[in-house]
Amino acid sequence: MDTASENKNQDFLARYAPVTGTSVIQHLEQLAAPLKGARVVHVNSTREGGGVAEILQKLIPLKKALGIETSWEVINGSPDFYECTKSFHNALQGMGRKVSDDLLKAYEQTNADCAERLRGVLEEADFVFIHDPQPAALLSHFPNRRGKWIWRCHIDASHPFRSVWKYLRPWLASYDASIFSLPEFAQPLPHAQYIVAPSIDPLSEKNRHLPTAEIEAVYAKFGLDPARPLVLQVSRYDRFKDPLGVIQAYLLAAKLTPLQLVLAGGGASDDPEGQEVLQEVQRAAEGHPDIHVLMLPSDAHRTINALQRASDIVIQKSIREGFGLTVTEGMWKGKPVIGGDTGGIRLQVFNHYTGFLVRTPEGAALRMRYLLHRARLRREMGERARQFVMDNFLITRHLREYLTLLVGLQGGCEERVVVG
Amino acid sequence: MASTTPDIYPFEVKDCALITLSTGTKVQNLKEFRDALEKVPLPSIDHHFWGRLLRPQFDEPEYNNDFASWAYHGLHDKPLAERLSMTLPTDFDSLEALRLELVDTVEQRLDESEMIPWAKADQQFHFLHSQIVVFDTGLRFDDPKDLTAYLPSLSTGCIFYHFIDARRRTEQRCDDFSAWLSGFGDRYQSLRERLCGFDPYFSSLDEIRTQIANLFQAFFEEQS
């Protein structure tokens, strides 16, 4: 690497020091030293939309800044491929529906085609991260791979639909390691299973500080009333995010408390069900002028940031959730969060401290009313929530754990690895 | 007693990073818990005494290890939680001896129980373990007074390595700071005693760092 590139990388890392402290950056640099020059490739199925793409957009430049040669490859397939992988996604989250042989054939064919396209880069890589089930079958096409392959599961796979898990397991068993977001999600596999929670980037467009005028501009832009409380759910239009349950909760709470609801979502290119769910949500919101259903483009990060900052309560009433980055984002903006009592949301939302965990629309309505009547409590919860994210869910912690994992794998999975 | 052969060496500041792994073993009732305690790898037993320092947690830790916490929050068995929380790893010569003590405590509770306590399906206990990567920061201190000024800026990884990990890594089963100070004979005896008297079980790594820095600073202020 030339001096100019090195300086640029140093500058990129140094931008995080005012948020995390200098010692965190030094720690990352020392930890990354044994990995300098290593070739790391990440593979997933979309560059935009959804939490995985967002994390990779930030993790990859950070790894590069630490001297690790990191690249990102995306696999693309036919509509049958995406239908199949969406079924996998739903099945891993417990939705029991068989996947037809034709769709499985499309899945295997797409992986075989992509393996040929990516053969050079993947065969020579020192470490390959395969994200979620979409590219999971790639490994079988690389008998001569030289590096370690890691399967990263971002999904709540605690209770997978068994017939789909039985199909996927042989593809996954050959990996050198897997990563799950929570211990509860780990499944019996014959290799090391690491536990790494996701993270947010405090400097991204979606999470950085915004001028007040930009926050206030969202009221006019979306026809919101600044004088009335605002409850916001940001997520893809996906049944597991329970947008219909959020509308039900709003209708219950709005009988007694004046408020507005914004459902802000976008599509992901690997999610064929999104449009159908959006239409269901639009139908449910019909005739309720204070329910705002927004379909935002995948790059509307600043708009989402402003909406989160303008809201009084952030809600994420998922019934299954791998982690819930929108929860983390809301907490980072100092908002109390009403979250579904599931998956990674439990790792972030603590009753009466950072928000409330709920299981029903009624529970969500109750907590909306409770919080909207207590402005001071909302502020206190929000402050605790922001500090909790600062301590636990920033991208620097995520990066540290990935680096630890890579050094650990280099060290042969020993319990204690001493470097330098 | 005055030391006759001081063994003075520079304090080498090391840092570490840890990552959590699943053992694949999970349990839902007290009998399964007893059986798993007998079988899980020893590093998992160790992890559940210190792993909370690495994990996101918000509330004040009511119990000082994961076993006690699960006994209370998962099984709702307060007597067992209280007994498990008073089991201290440093009281045992080896992790195997610690394991036997835990099994014994659970056995006793099973004997006392008319029914086997169960946790809800989503409150199972997951046995975990951790991998530690240790690296040298290159920092060296010959004089404890010089280290004092640097302590508040040490990373939490350094604190974990020298104050927590040292207890399982070293023969003396004490922290690295105390072990280093002992090389100076009786000169820092009082500081060593204060360090040994600090109970880290209910603190975060940030709090432990602050407390160690305060102990060093107070000692040298008294000396001046």
Image (cartoon, rainbow, N blue to C red):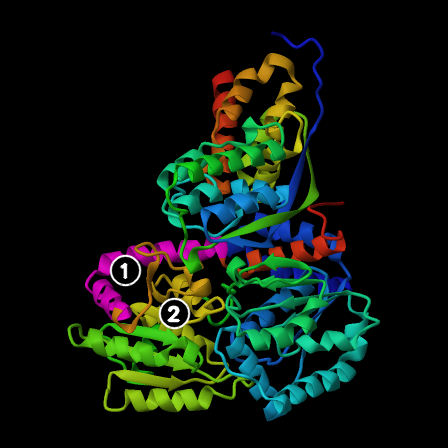
Residue at position x 24%, y 83% from top?
Answer: A290
Q: Which residue is mark 2?
A: A211
Looking at the image, which residue sits at the far left?
A256
Q: Residues within 10 Å of mark 1 (few under 14, many from 20)?
A: many
Residue B81 vs residue A284, the one in the foreground: B81
Q: Quadrant of residue A316?
A: bottom left
Q: Please rate how many residues cluster around mark 2, counting C-alpha atoms within 10 Å: few if below 14, some from 14 to 19, many from 20.
A: few
Which residue appears at 45% of the width and 90% of the height?
A275
Residue A343 drawn at (x, y percent): 45, 64
For the point 75% across and 58% down, the residue is A36
Asked if the residues shown at circle 2 and circle 1 are in contact, with their CB atoms under 8 angstroms apart, the answer is no
Q: Is residue A385 magenta?
A: yes
Q: Is residue A105 above or below residue A225?
A: below
Camera sees residue B179 = yes
State the SS at label 2. loop
Residue A341 appears left or right of A121: left
Which label is found at residue A279? none
Displayed quadrant of residue A165: bottom right
User: Which numbered disc, 2 or 1, marks the residue that appears first in the sequence?
Assistant: 2
Magenta stretch in the rendered image: A363-392
Which residue lies most toward the right here? Answer: A144
Most common SS among magenta residues: helix
- Where does the image place residue A226, in percent across and percent down from the top left? 24, 76
In the image, what residue type sits under mark 2? Pro
Q: Is residue A283 above or below residue A148?
A: below
Which quadrant holds the N terminus of chain A? bottom right
Camera-nearest residue between A202 and B15: B15
Residue drawn at x 62%, y 34% as measured from the top left: B96
SS class, disc 1: helix
Q: Which residue is mark 1?
A: A378
Circle 1 marks a residue in which chain?
Answer: A
Q: Are marks 2 and 1 on the same chain?
A: yes
